[in-house]
Amino acid sequence: MKIYLSGAIRGGRELQKVYYIIYEHLKTKEIIVLTYHVALPNVIEIEDALSDSKIYNQDISWLKECDAVIAETSVPSLGVGYEISYALHILRKPVLCVYEQKRAPISAMISGNSSQSLIIYSYRDISDLLRHIDNFLDFLQS
Ligand code: 6IA
């Protein structure tokens, strides 16, 4: 299974360690994470070497390739919001949004979206986060 992991880059890197935990967790389940760079600590420096249009075109192509999107939405990010909407409404793919409970409320444009393919959970701690992710993976495989 191929997952598009979405998390804030220019929106702010304060949850990079959480993105890395999600990435490592998915890897233990032999899932291909198309966007592993989201989890890298030095993504911003590497990013400087790529043009924005190359980044955009590559990400759209990974969105088309993935089976589903997992978006960590605690840190508000234009790119993450765009990817969620593109996956849901253009590509009709399932999307899981997870965010830290203490960051609630997230944008109403996510929490108010009643699309059947969108699952949204807040989490208290990392074990709670990974449980939501595992439930989503079970749902995808059912
Ligand atoms: O607005 P933001 O930058 O916070 O948007 C973050 C989202 O946009 C992430 O979920 C990514 O999928 C996407 N994104 C932003 N910058 C990049 C990027 N930079 N590469 C791929 N996707 C990106 C170059 C990184 C380099 C290590 C290859």
Image: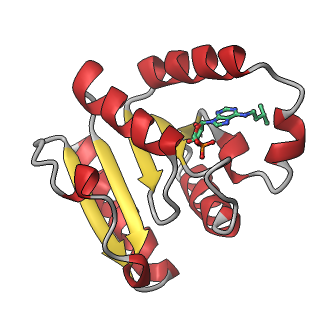
Q: Nearer the viewer, residue 82 or 92?
A: 82
Q: Position of residue 101 (x, y in %)?
A: 37, 81
Tell me where residue 14 sits by quadrant: bottom right
Tell me where residue 52 sits by quadrant: top right
Instruction: State whether residue 96 is above or below residue 132.
Output: above
Q: Is residue 81 visible?
A: yes
Q: Work out which quarter of the rendered image holds the C terminus and state it.
A: top left
Residue displayed at 23% across by 26% down: 89
Left or right: where 66 falls relative to 26: left
Q: Work out which quarter of the rendered image holds the N terminus and state it.
A: top left
Instruction: State whether residue 49 is above or below residue 130.
Output: above
Left or right: where 23 falls relative to 102: right
* Colour logic: secondary structure
Q: Position of residue 91 (x, y in %)?
A: 29, 20
Q: Nearer the viewer, residue 124 or 139?
A: 124
Residue displayed at 50% across by 19% down: 60
Q: Is residue 91 visible?
A: no
Tell me where residue 98 sits by quadrant: bottom left
Numbered label tally: 0
Q: Nearer the viewer, residue 34 or 79?
A: 79
